[in-house]
């Protein structure tokens, strides 16, 4: 009889634990339901909302430097074996400068990862622009690979064109991935 009593006590204790677990689970669900119904946010929800708003503001700032209809469209459409506007890279350089600031980081790690990929691609592109292009003599508002390279140093000209165009393509791909990730994560 002693064993049967012990088994019964264990079964009762288990039933009490299960009942308490269900009660507290139900309590949590009831609290969440009432919060939603009454429009009351938990501290964590408030914090998440503030972080999301901060990320949205940073997104707006970044798209003021890198614009789909402006410099990013020019990079997307340009063939860097010819002339391009010298001021095309100004906003890109400003963006890169801002990226050194810790206030210019996203709270959302997925978005921050895409921004870092964009930074790396832009750095490669700007490096190629600095390495392979020069101010165009007749008009200092433009840059280009020296025209005489095309005939005197065709291998160097093609290598420079390839470096510029491939780094521009990588930059556009990274920009597109960044914009898509922001739209998804920030519900834009």
Image (tube, rainbow, N blue to C red):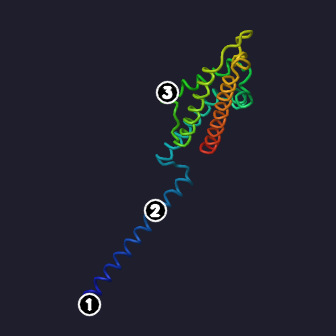
- Nearer the viewer's eye, disc 3 or disc 2? 3
Image quarter for residue 96? top right
Along the viewing direction, whichever of 25 and 145 lies nearer the viewer: 145
Label 3 vs label 1: CA separation? Answer: 74 Å
Looking at the rendered structure, the secondary structure element under dot 2 is helix
Q: Position of residue 93 (x, y in %)?
A: 59, 22
Quadrant for the N terminus, please. bottom left
Q: Earlier in the sequence, mark 3 or mark 2?
A: 2
Dot 3 corresponds to which residue? 101
Which residue, as the protein is rendered here, is positioned at the far left? 2
Dot 2 corresponds to which residue? 27
Tally the marks. 3
Image quarter for residue 143? top right
Q: Earlier in the sequence, mark 3 or mark 1?
A: 1
- Contact flag, marks 3 and 1 (Cβ < 8 Å): no
Q: Position of residue 169 (x, y in %)?
A: 67, 34
Looking at the rendered structure, the secondary structure element under dot 3 is loop
- Nearer the viewer's eye, disc 3 or disc 1? 3
In the rendered image of this protein, does residue 168 appear above or below residue 42?
above
Q: Residue at x 41, y 72 (%)?
A: 19
Dot 1 corresponds to which residue? 1
15 on left or right of 182: left
């Amino acid at each position: 009889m002693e064993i049967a009593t012990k088994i019964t006590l264990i079964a009762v204790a288990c039933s009490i634990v299960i009942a308490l677990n269900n009660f507290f689970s139900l309590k949590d669900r009831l609290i969440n339901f009432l919060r939603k119904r009454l429009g009351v946010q938990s501290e964590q929800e408030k914090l998440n909302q503030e972080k999301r708003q901060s990320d949205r503001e940073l997104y707006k700032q970044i798209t003021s430097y890198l614009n789909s209809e402006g410099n990013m469209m020019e990079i997307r459409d340009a063939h860097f074996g010819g002339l391009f506007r010298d001021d095309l890279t100004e906003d890109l350089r400003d963006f890169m400068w801002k990226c050194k600031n810790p206030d210019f980081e996203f709270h959302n790690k997925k978005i921050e990862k895409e921004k870092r990929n964009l930074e790396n691609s832009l750095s490669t592109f700007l490096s190629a622009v600095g390495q392979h292009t020069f101010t165009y003599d007749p008009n200092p508002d433009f840059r280009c690979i020296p025209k005489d390279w095309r005939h005197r140093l065709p291998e160097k000209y093609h290598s420079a064109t390839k470096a510029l165009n491939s780094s521009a393509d990588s930059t556009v791909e990274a920009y597109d991935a960044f914009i898509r990730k922001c739209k998804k994560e920030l519900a834009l």
